[in-house]
Image (cartoon, rainbow, N blue to C red):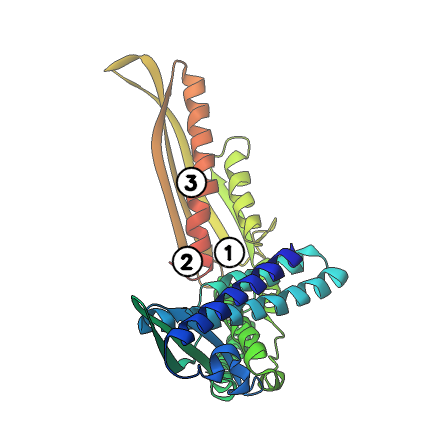
Amino acid sequence: MFKMKNTIKILCALVFVCALFISCGSGSGKAPDWILNPSSVYPDSEYVSAVGQGTSRQLAERDATAAITREIKQRVQAEITAQESLVNDGLGWSQNNSLLSTVDTTSDIEISGITIQEVYSVKRSGGEDWYALALIDRQQTGSYYKTKAQGNIDVINAKIIEAYKNPNTFTSAEILHQAVVLAEETDMYLDILNVVNPKMRSIVVPDYKNAQAVAELERQMRAAVTVFIEVDGDVNGRIQAAFKSVLKKYSVTTSLDKATAAYVLEVSVSFTPFEMTADVSNKYARYTLDAAMVEQSTGNTVFTYAENGREAHLTESEAVQRAIRTTEQAINQKFSAQFGSFINGED
């Protein structure tokens, strides 16, 4: 696959060169050196460069911008792939996947600092061929990403300190989630900086290491939050088990001791059989659920959830079972989504 990609690149380059010479032959004057060898005019030590081609100036400039953007992203991906191999040798695939997520994020972002430095056109029969040179100044763009990264790092450090001031609370988890989001963005900035200006990158060393480390800290903070689940009207512990499963999904610890728990999830649930005169062939069961997350130290309700509806079946017992299953499903899906937004500070 690697050989095939190289072959394709070489063929494309040959086509590009042939097209240029043919165009120059029909035009006047020699083509500028930057078209075939940008680094001869704009040294690689100072610039990242790429040449684009099109039938109009706009298309050529757009092509050059796209080419230099691809160049940066490919170099970033190569850097992260190298890190991935290192991590996989020492720490395993779980760490590796987090590194690759940065590549996905990078692929969606626009690279800053791109300028069109040169343009050149050659007349040919039936139109013109245009060439454009896109540049990234390593010093200027490096300073931009260094400043962006350092600004984020300062905010992340402050958030980590703030989280430690609110231990064992959902507040600390929310603050650290914000820090994780910023740390992922910062990792991306630093990856780009490492490609554009490695010397500047070596100066910026986050105290928290990287986004993975902040995410692990967030997980630890969540695990330190203890919740006692209290269900009135439960059926064989099924509703409690559903809530416990969701809390575990978000790394929150379920406490067996109400007195020492930081929070109590107060749940009231009922499954009530009833009949409808308009439908004598079916039996019905109404389900109603109300839940409130109460902080024990203050008595404040920090999160609520409610669900209600009805189920029908030929028998009353099965109608009730359906109502229970529907409630469990609602907890695993709707409650889970709402609780996730709450714990991440997105509600």
Q: Position of residue 335 (x, y in %)?
A: 43, 45
The percent coordinates of residue 32 (x first, y second) are: 45, 84
- Reading the image, the residue beneath label 2 is 302
**Mark 2, secondary structure of its residue:** strand
User: Which residue is at 55% across, 31% downward?
Assistant: 236
Image quadrant assignment for residue 87: bottom right
Q: Secondary structure at mark 1?
A: strand
Residue at the disc numbered 1: 263
Is residue 110 shown to the viewer in this render? Answer: no
Task: Kindly identify which residue carries mark 3.
Answer: 268
> Which residue lies most toward the top here?
281
Whether residues under marks 2 and 1 lie with C-beta atoms below 8 angstroms apart, the answer is yes
| Front position in the image: 151 or 279 | 151
Q: Residue furthest front?
A: 25
- 121 left or right of 30? left
Q: Mark 3 or 1 closer to N-term? A: 1
Please name the residue shown 50% across and 52% down the image. Answer: 264
Q: Disc 2 and disc 1: Cα gap in Å?
A: 9 Å
Disc 2 residue crowd, few under 14, some 14–19, many 20+, Cα 10 Å: few
Label 2–label 3 contact, CB within 8 A: no
Alpha carbons under labels 3 and 1: distance apart: 16 Å
Q: Nearer the viewer, mark 2 or mark 3?
A: 2
Given the image, on which type of amino acid does mark 1 rest? Answer: Tyr
Q: The residue under label 2 is which amino acid type?
A: Val
